[in-house]
Image (cartoon, rainbow, N blue to C red):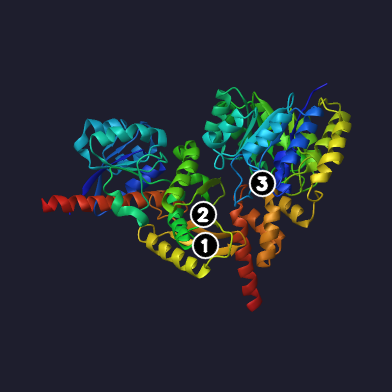
Amino acid sequence: MEKVMVAILGTGNIGSDLLAKVMHSKYLACSLFAGRSSDSKGIARARKMGINTSTDSVDAILDNPDCCDIVFDSTNAESHARHAPMLSRIDKFTLDLTPSKLGFMCVPVLNLDEALSYNDINLITCGGQSSIPIAHALMQSCPKTEYIELASSISSKSAGPGTRINIDEYVQATRKGMEHFTGVRHAKAIINLNPAEPPINMHNTLYMETSCEPDMGAIKKNVAAVVEKMKCYVPGVHIVAGPIFEGDRVTVITSVIGAGDFLPKYAGNLDIMTCAAVTVAEAYAKKMKGKRASV
Amino acid sequence: MKEIRVIDSTLRDGSHAMRHRFTAENIHSYSAAAESAGVKVLVVGHGNGLGASSLQIGKSDLSDKEYVEIAIKELKNTKLGVLTVPGFGTVKDDLEPAINAGAEVIFVTCHCTEADTTQKHIEYVSSVGKEAIGVLMMTHMLSPEGLLEQAQKMQGYGAYGILLMDSAGALLPSDVTARVAALRNGLKINVGFHAHNNLGMAVANSLAAVEAGATFIDTTMRGYGAGAGNCPMEIITAVLHKSGYKTGMDEFALMNISDGIVAKFMKKPIEIDGVRLASGLAGVFSGFCPIAERAGAQFGVDPKEILMELGRRRIVAGQEDYITEVAIELAGKKKKQGEI
């Protein structure tokens, strides 16, 4: 199959990891890797690999709209708010990896097919991608739950400047995603950065508040089933502990070990975002090619 | 005679010791007493700050809004303070409403290596004309030079002062002197210190900070706070007076509040038991102690061992979920050893 061309906006940790994943993709090829800063290390690395780069950011796409069908935006929430209408005008299928809270929220294991009919797809946050499916499974077992909470820890090394400046947006977008997908009345998200060496793996603790002892057998089965499904596109996600019932709560602790494409394996928080985004992009590419072939 | 600003965080750090169960009456009566004693800044709210009432840290009986609204009614000359940790509370959801309700001194807090997570919060506080104090937690985990670098970032965002927290109660007086002196020499803004008493050093460390140039210290009445507690406000005030500093407060008025109000609402006296001493040795956040005790009882493990293992893993404040995980792991190991 002829590969579908993608452009990557943002040349930091997430953009560089996306590039590595697109390079191994059977369905996608990177035609443009664009940022703002001429001294970006990401641009220098991409250039060495023979990738077409630009420091004109979104303008590089607007000036040459035929360069790609799919755009990954890994800049930051404010920049994506500017990019989204421009990219929509030139009809690009856009995957937003910033916590912009704009666009159609997608968690591939829950709504991949539906997402393909929208053109601005938001991947929520790393915490959201890792834990919304599990929250969804918990809520299916206990639909009367009124409160769920996610506390995530990531290594300081894996949190670039975009992640740090968008820490409020992370908290808000993760909460919004949890409430949207599970239907719970109230959700909360917490994020910690830990500077330990060697760096910690991405770590998520999901709590569901309960007033009575739930059917733990059913919960364990549902959670294990959804984690298996997630492994199809994020192989490093796994349960560390739980589900356990402790008086007022059910707790599930998970961790994500990255593929080690750009940053080392500890950066599962990067990996889960880029895996989800590439999964959606590949599904879109297959659909696009299928349509073209049938015309 | 040099004046030292003694900050009163009884209704903030004390929330940990109360298991986040302060009542409206506690807030009301203590705030009124603090005003009458001439307290300069009274900090209120959940122990981990705005938006931190959670299953992860502990749910608060009162909302942030209630804390602020009840306290502000009693205050005239005393300024109301709140604390916020980016990653828990956000500008829009938590900080803005607290400032609109009357908070004037905002402690924007992060782990000591992560100052750039506080940029938007400090800039926001400065932009609305309030006082932003940049707070670095767990300062035993970073060198004086490293702390200066982080504090300089906060100064650049517009912080009015920098507060160094010994969140684990792990520092000795010479460590405090080195840290405060490094900041005093390298910053244009004020430096403060917040002690915990796990190694019995809270008063000595606070005095060392002042002697190294700190112009404010963060304290709680009777040391009422997380783990082994904080630097007792009434004691350090008396000690500062004896050492020739002014505080603008009368130690006898503080003693009366300590005995008349705080002693009555305290769940139990603050003491340095084995678990709290171990927490200081391990260098983990003092607030982990009760959670480690609970997890230890549930999974049949010595809470001191849990804390020491958390220290080896360099777990930081906010990562309370690792306590249960480590307890489960240690219980598993113990079982295995028993089988062999």
- Mark 2 sits on what residue? A203
Residue B175 visible here: no
Q: Which disc is residue B20 wearing?
A: none
- Of residue B66 and residue A195, the one placed in the foreground of this image is B66
Q: Residue at x 56, y 42 (%)?
A: B88
Residue type, label 3? Asp
Say if labels 3 and 1 share a chain: no
Q: Residue at x 49, y 61 (%)?
A: A142
Q: Chain of mark 1?
A: A
Residue B58's place in the image compared with B136, above or below, is: below
Residue type, label 1? Val
Image position, residue B203 (x, y; %): 81, 39
Pair 3/1: label in front: 3
- Of residue B160 and residue B295, the one placed in the foreground of this image is B295
Q: In which image quadrant can residue B124 be found?
A: top right
Image position, residue B56 (x, y; %): 60, 51
Q: Say which element carries label 3.
A: loop
Q: Residue at x 50, y 57 (%)?
A: A144
* Disc with the residue nearer the chain's start (2 vs 1): 2
Residue A128's place in the image compared with B73, above or below, is: below
Pair 2/3: label in front: 3
Residue most extreme to the bottom: B340
- Mark 3 burial class by Cα count in 10 Å: few <14, some 14-19, many 20+: some
